[in-house]
Image (spheres, rainbow, N blue to C red):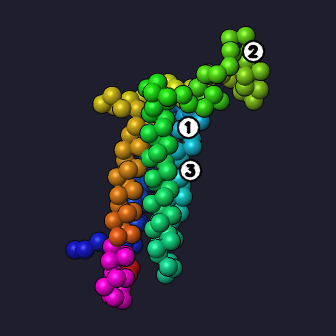
Amino acid sequence: MTLTPKSLGMTAAAGSAALLLGAFVFQALGYAPCAMCIWQRYPHAIAIGMGALLLFALPILPILIIGALSVLSTSALGVFHTGVERGWWEGPTSCTGSGLDVSQMSVSELLPSASSNTSNLVLCSEVVWEFLTLSMASWNAILSGVLACLWLVAIARHQKVRWHGVADVS
C-alpha cells in the first residue's frame, strides 16, 4: 500500500495532536509549562489545522508546505529551548531570570499578575522532566523533526505525481 500525500500529511498532523495532547497530560500531572514550552505548542496547533484541511478537496500543496513549516518551527524552538536549558546559550530574559538583578525586586514587581501564586513559576532555563537524559523540549525537537520528515515526504510525493502527470494527487 502506497501512502498518498494526503494520508502522510494527516498522519503527521495526528503526530502533532499526540505531542500536544502529551503536553497537556504533563501539565495536568503538575508539570507547569514555561513560556518557551507554550511557544512550542502553537505550531503543533497549526499542523493539526492543516491536517484537518486535508480532508477537503482543496489544493493540497500549500497545506502540506504550511504543515511542514509549522513542525519545523516547533522543532527549531525545541532545539533553542534545549540549548537554554543546557546553558549552551542565553534564553529570553523574560523567562530565564538572566539579564536583570532580580534579587532586589519583589514578587509583585517581577510578576504582577501572579503575585498571589508563585508555586507554578517555571523558568525556561530549568529542566523539570527528562527521559533518557533528554528534556521535554529535546523530545519535542526530535519528534517534531520526524513529523517534518513526514510532511516533506508528502510534499515530495505530491510533486512527483505532478511531474509525472498522474491525475490523482490525493
- Classed neighbour count for the residue bearing mark 2: other residues with Cα under 10 Å, few (<14), some (14–19), many (≥20): few
- Contact between marks 1 and 2 (CB within 8 A): the answer is no
Location of residue 52 with respect to 145 vertically, above or below = below
The magenta stretch is 157-168
- Residue drawn at (74%, 14%) of the image: 105
Location of residue 36 with respect to 51 vertically, above or below = above
At label 1, the amino acid type is Met
* Residue 82 drawn at (x, y percent): 44, 33
At label 3, the amino acid type is Tyr
Badge 2 element = loop
Q: Earlier in the sequence, mark 1 or mark 2?
A: 1
Q: Earlier in the sequence, mark 2 or mark 3?
A: 3
Of 140 and 69, which appears nearest the observer? 69
Q: Earlier in the sequence, mark 3 or mark 1?
A: 1
Does residue 160 appear left or right of residue 119 in this picture?
left
Which residue is label 3 attached to?
A: 42
- Contact between marks 3 and 1 (CB within 8 A): the answer is no
Which residue is label 2 attached to?
A: 106
Badge 3 element = helix
Alpha-carbon distance for marks 1 and 2? Answer: 23 Å
Which residue is label 1 attached to?
A: 36
